[in-house]
Image (cartoon, helix red, strand yellow):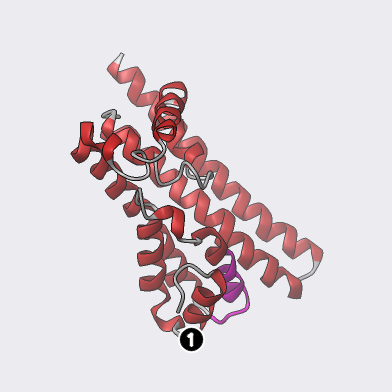
């Protein structure tokens, strides 16, 4: 298996569908870490895995559970890494090679606060850097965790859920397809609104 080739990874997962939770957890955990994430095509793989779920090749519960856990705990580990390295983070790749990436990540976090974790998850250049920089800047742990969990869930739902819906709805009628897509959208909105509301509530208590 070539870990840099989405097709190769998808084929490996297909051949080892019984271990899909473990495979997705390891892939998404590694993809969330600064210095590693740029090399792993996690989003493309999630879309392919979603197709496997939609076609019945892979079980939805272990697939989504492994993906959620990997994305969320990977973000947490990245945050802890940035907090641990602190002032040494600028000397760590990729920031040592591309210092403007660190500057842009700092500005992005200062501008958007906790929402930067949510927004950064959907940007490949920012996904492996924002949590680490948030740790370096000592973003409150509770705020980070709320947005990190929401971001991980929404991101997985968008890619893997999208792949599953596109595949599954090919055998459904239009009304069923709309119902499934609407359910995914509703869950996504609830998660996002919940994270933002929790952050505002916490800020209100601090103020």
Name the image quarter holding residue 50. bottom right
Q: Residue at x 33, y 45 (%)?
A: 93
Q: Give the magenta part as a residue range.
A: 47-57
Given the current orientation, which residue lies at the most extreme bottom position?
Answer: 15
Name the chief secondary structure element in magenta.
helix
Q: Please give left or right for residue 78 compared with residue 1 in the image.
A: left
Q: What percent of the width, then of the height, locates residue 52?
A: 58, 76
Q: Nearer the viewer, residue 11 or 112?
A: 11
Can see residue 140? Answer: no
Q: Nearer the viewer, residue 119 or 201?
A: 119
Q: Residue at x 40, y 38 (%)?
A: 130
In the rendered image, residue 17 lying in the magenta stretch gets the answer no
Given the current orientation, which residue lies at the most extreme front position?
Answer: 97
For label 1, the SS is: helix
Given the current orientation, which residue lies at the most extreme left position?
Answer: 84
Depicted 203 relative to depicted 180: above or below: above
Name the image quarter holding residue 145. top left
Name the image quarter holding residue 105. top left
Q: Nearer the viewer, residue 35 or 158?
A: 35
Quadrant containing the C terminus in the rendered view: top left
Q: Which residue is mark 1?
A: 15
Q: What percent of the width, then of the height, locates residue 194?
A: 46, 37
Q: Residue at x 41, y 22 (%)?
A: 110
Q: What percent of the width, then of the height, locates residue 2?
A: 46, 75
Can see residue 163? Answer: yes
Depicted 49 relative to depicted 31: above or below: below
Label 1 crowding class (10 Å Cα cut-off): few <14, some 14-19, many 20+? Answer: few
Q: Nearer the viewer, residue 127 or 198?
A: 127
Instruction: Give the tally of numbered discs.
Output: 1
Q: Please give left or right for residue 170 compared with residue 80 in the image.
A: right
Q: What percent of the width, then of the height, locates residue 179?
A: 70, 58
Q: Residue at x 27, y 33 (%)?
A: 136
């Amino acid at each position: 298996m070539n870990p840099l080739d989405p097709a190769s990874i998808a084929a490996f997962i297909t051949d080892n569908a019984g271990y899909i939770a473990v495979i997705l957890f390891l892939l998404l955990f590694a993809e969330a870490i600064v210095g590693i994430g740029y090399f792993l095509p996690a989003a493309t793989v999630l879309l392919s895995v979603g197709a496997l779920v939609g076609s019945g090749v892979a079980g939805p519960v272990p697939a989504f559970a492994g993906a959620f856990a990997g994305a969320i705990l990977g973000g947490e580990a990245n945050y802890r890494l940035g907090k641990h390295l602190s002032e040494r983070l600028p000397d760590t790749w990729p920031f040592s090679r591309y210092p403007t990436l660190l500057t842009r990540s700092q500005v992005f976090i200062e501008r958007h606060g906790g929402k930067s974790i949510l927004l950064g998850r959907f940007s490949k250049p920012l996904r492996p850097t924002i949590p680490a920089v948030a740790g370096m800047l000592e973003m409150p742990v509770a705020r980070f965790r709320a947005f990190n969990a929401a971001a991980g869930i929404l991101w997985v739902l968008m890619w893997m859920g999208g792949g599953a819906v596109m595949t599954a709805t090919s055998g459904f009628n239009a009304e069923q397809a709309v119902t499934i897509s609407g359910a995914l959208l509703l869950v996504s909105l609830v998660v996002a609104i919940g994270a933002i509301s929790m952050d505002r509530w916490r800020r209100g208590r601090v103020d």
